[in-house]
Image (tube, helix red, strand yellow):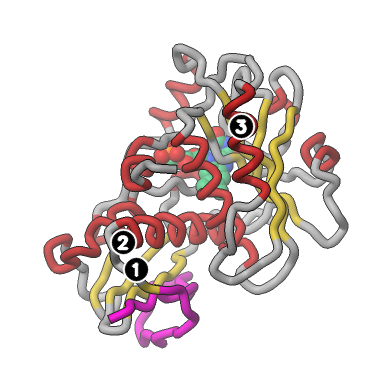
């Protein structure tokens, strides 16, 4: 599509009030074509995505999720096979689909829950060796947000993001990276900062170094739910999607590698995820 991914990232926000109508035929077809072949994720995990019609107010049947979704009937449903970094890959491709839906001017909202025994698992014919961690309503927005939606978004502080010094660093975790010092990479980093994350926890941390940008996950203390997939790893995949697509749009080429810089002093509950290696 001939649109700026940076514009799409800036435009996207979670939308929880839908019109109740099915997707227009044209949008549905485009969405289905995209989901049939969303590309290869960084760690090459096996994924499947489908558009599912869950009937009127389908989101009422989603245990384990939060927020109140109204009037949604079409959903992006994605599954992934087990494997190293499978949830990062899942987040990366799912977010690409969400940005594609944003380009079609559709409303979306990530929803992570316990989905194995739902209509969504049934419709996508979930296999024993697959996990189904998230779904996303996709459709025409209701002319106005419901009161609950507006209150929820405000209460969750969903517009708020952590400031640069909390997220981005130079060489190690003790030296914050300024936008000025990041130079041409300030845009891809800012696009990470604007990313959606489960409960808006923003667990991504990035260290800029000579070889590239090292991504880390700083887990939230209270955020391990044994019934749910590890949503914070999905958040990391979303960040990778935003970083890569906006870097490429700026003509900054590179590739994802696994080259842990073995930083000696890392903050608590922090783990290495991947490196964006710069083509110099
Ligand atoms: C993996 C993941 C799971 C999420 N699960 C839910 C959910 O179950 N219910 C919900 O209303 N929002 C959910 N969200 C949306 C976040 O609350 C939202 O992205 C965050 O508050 C930032 O707001 P924004 O998307 O408007 O920028 C989820 C987001 C992510 C990335």
Label 2 to label 3: alpha-carbon separation: 29 Å
Above or below 118: residue 169: below
Say what secondary structure mark 3 lies in. Answer: strand
Name the residue at 59% across, 26% down. 26
Describe residue 63's horizontal placement relative to residue 44 as left or right. Answer: right
Q: Are marks 1 and 2 in contact (CB under 8 Å)?
A: yes
* Residue annotated with mark 2: 167
Above or below 36: residue 266: below
Above or below 118: residue 140: above
The foreground one among 207 and 28 is: 28
Q: Residues within 10 Å of mark 2 (few under 14, many from 20)?
A: many
The quarter of the image holding the N terminus is top left
Name the residue at 64% across, 23% down. 25
Q: Which residues are magenta?
A: 255-280
Name the residue at 26% across, 83% down. 210
Mark 3 against mark 1, which lies toward the viewer?
Answer: 3
Residue 24 is one of the magenta-drawn residues: no
Which corner quadrant of the image does residue 57 belong to? top right
Disc on the earlier residue, 3 or 1: 3
Q: Residues within 10 Å of mark 3 (few under 14, many from 20)?
A: many
* Residue annotated with mark 3: 137
Q: Are marks 2 and 3 in contact (CB under 8 Å)?
A: no
Where's residue 272, x and y in %? 47, 76
Where's residue 77, x and y in %? 69, 42
Label 1 to label 2: alpha-carbon separation: 6 Å
């Amino acid at each position: 599509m001939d649109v700026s991914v940076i514009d799409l990232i800036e435009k996207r926000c979670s939308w929880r009030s839908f019109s109740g109508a099915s997707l227009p035929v044209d949008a549905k077809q485009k969405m289905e074509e995209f989901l049939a072949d969303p590309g290869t994720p960084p760690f090459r995990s096996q994924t499947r995505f489908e558009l599912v019609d869950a009937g009127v107010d389908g989101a009422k049947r989603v245990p384990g999720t939060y927020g109140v979704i109204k009037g949604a009937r079409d959903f992006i449903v994605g599954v992934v096979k087990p494997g190293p970094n499978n949830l990062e890959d899942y987040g990366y491709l799912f977010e690409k689909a969400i940005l594609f839906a944003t380009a079609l001017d559709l409303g979306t909202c990530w929803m992570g829950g316990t989905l194995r025994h739902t209509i969504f698992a049934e419709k996508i014919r979930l296999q024993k060796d697959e996990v189904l961690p998230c779904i996303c309503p996709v459709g025409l927005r209701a002319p106005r947000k419901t009161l609950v939606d507006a209150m929820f978004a405000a209460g969750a502080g969903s517009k708020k993001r952590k400031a640069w010094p909390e997220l981005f660093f130079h060489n190690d975790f003790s030296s914050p990276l300024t936008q000025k010092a990041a130079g041409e990479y300030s845009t891809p980093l800012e696009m990470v900062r604007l990313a959606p994350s489960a409960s808006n926890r923003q667990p991504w941390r990035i260290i800029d170094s000579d070889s590239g940008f090292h991504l880390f996950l700083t887990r939230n203390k209270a955020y391990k739910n044994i019934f749910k997939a590890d949503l914070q790893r999905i958040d990391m995949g979303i960040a990778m999607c935003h970083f890569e697509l906006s870097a490429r749009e700026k003509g900054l080429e590179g590739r994802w590698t696994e080259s842990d810089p073995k930083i000696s002093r890392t903050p608590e509950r922090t783990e290495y995820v991947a490196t964006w290696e710069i083509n110099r």
